[in-house]
Amino acid sequence: MYAILDIETTGGKYNEEGITEIAIYRFDGHQVVDKFISLVNPEREIQPFVVNLTGINNNMLRNAPKFYEVAKRIVEITEDCIIVAHNAQFDYRILRTEFKRLGFGFKRKTLCTVELAKQLIPDQPSYSLGKLTRALGIPVSDRHRANGDAMATVKLFKMLLSKDLSKRIIKDNVKVEIIKRLNDTHKRIIDELPSITGVYYIHDENGEIIYIGKSKNIKHRINQHFTNDSNKSKKIQLLAKSVTYEATGSELVALLKESEEIKRNKPIFNRALRRNSFTHGLYIFTDDNNYINLKVSKVNSQEHPITTFSNLQSAKSFLNRVIDDYSLCQKLVGLSTSKSNCFNYTIKKCDGACVLEEPHESYNMRVQELIAKNSYSDRNMIIIDQGRDIEEKSVIYIEDGVFRGLGFFDLNHQINNIEVLSSIITPMENNRDTQHIIQSYLRRNKRVKTLIIENQ
């Protein structure tokens, strides 16, 4: 659990500042579950430059509660939380100073979004909250007021959690949670999980991730892990002390994140999934009569397939579909070994490429359409799918035929501007696994939106 906050102060000498406004959002890693926003009477004058910056003046605070009147609420809303702030060292110091004046020792773990952003979104020209949120397309209202800046920090932190592929942030949080809830049973863990699409992480007593998976129903999938009697499931049940998850909305995003994070984190019970998830590929060659032929064979490192398949049966099913969809010849896609015409020519479903009746130019044009539809080689494009809530969409970015990464957006200008798009994207490795995942998903989900990006 996190307490994401922002504090406005009077300014002045070090450790003599007073709080003028505070906003705290209690955040469970997915959504805000509680909030506290209040002006505070600092019982001292506000520096003129601060009045100009924030718009908060002494008259506004005359009837506001003093710090001792809001202290209990601050303790309650931050209890068992990691404090998150943009420049957390400053906000945490100010809070501790105020509590010290009351004779109360206030102690919490902290996370700084400035430091996290430098690690997870490198090479930004500035890491100030205003300039960073502008670069990421995050809307900010009431800049230099506690509520506006705290809400912007919530949105930034949510993006940073998604970009944290090594899961350092959630591992640290899980250690706090496990200490607090050592007596949790598997039933309680399952009860607290949602029935949503996403990636889940099973942790041991040290907070380390022992298994990563994805599911369209996380609660149901974890229930299977904890009730299955296979050897692997029994080992997981013995070590599992906590389960965290990341909502993705999109199954494609979940598949890509699962693949990337397994390779990065190498959980002990994911060894089998580190191998390639496909066995066969679709290849082309031109025969002596200048017809483009399709063939399915096992993937190898010498040839680059147009698309890949989980098994041979999946590849054959694909070929049978494209014969109908593109009016292709059974012989020229490798599904007929007849020495003369194919069977479809007999029933007038083949235009006769197998007996040289159809010109190779017209036949090859349809094959090229098939290739273009099932390969994103050399393309600049984005794939838009479901987001984590109704106002959000997910985006997968492909540049020059290379998968660059994925992210989430809720404003169109975040994907219309390439610089902003590149900033909100979580960079990921482009490999045969990711190509297979993307191509297979697009084959199965015809309604997913793809947009070609013109060179800018």
Image (tube, rainbow, N blue to C red):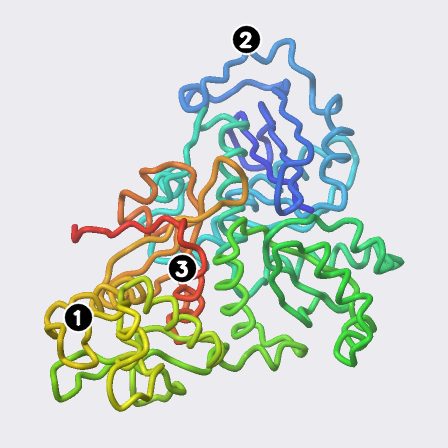
Q: Is residue 61 above or below residue 311?
A: above
Name the mark nearer the viewer: 2 or 1.
1
| Other residues around mark 2 within 10 Å, as few (<14) / some (14–19) / many (≥20) | few
Please name the amino acid that badge 1 sits on: Tyr
Q: CA distance from mark 2 to mark 1?
A: 81 Å
Please name the amino acid that badge 2 sits on: Asn
Q: Is residue 260 above or below residue 284?
A: above
Q: What residue sits right under mark 3 in the picture?
A: 442
Lateral position of residue 401 relative to residue 278, left or right: left
Callout 1 touching callout 3 (CB < 8 Å) = no
Q: Residue 263: image x %, image y %?
A: 52, 75
Q: Secondary structure at mark 3?
A: helix
Write down the quadrant of residue 18 in the picture.
Answer: top right
Query: Mark 3 or 2 closer to N-term?
Result: 2
Residue at left 32%, top 69%? 323
Please name the amino acid that badge 3 sits on: Leu
Q: Residue 286: image x %, image y %?
A: 17, 83
Name the mark nearer the viewer: 1 or 3.
1
The label number, if any, that marks residue 59 in the structure image = 2
Q: Residue 147: image x %, image y %?
A: 54, 27
| Other residues around mark 1 within 10 Å, as few (<14) / some (14–19) / many (≥20) | some
Lateral position of residue 229 relative to residue 432, left or right: right
Q: CA distance from mark 3 to mark 2?
A: 60 Å
| Other residues around mark 3 within 10 Å, as few (<14) / some (14–19) / many (≥20) | some
Name the mark nearer the viewer: 3 or 2.
3
Q: Residue 200: image x %, image y %?
A: 64, 60
Write down the quadrant of residue 296 in the picture.
Answer: bottom left
Residue at left 34%, top 42%? 414
Lateral position of residue 39 relative to residue 395, left or right: right
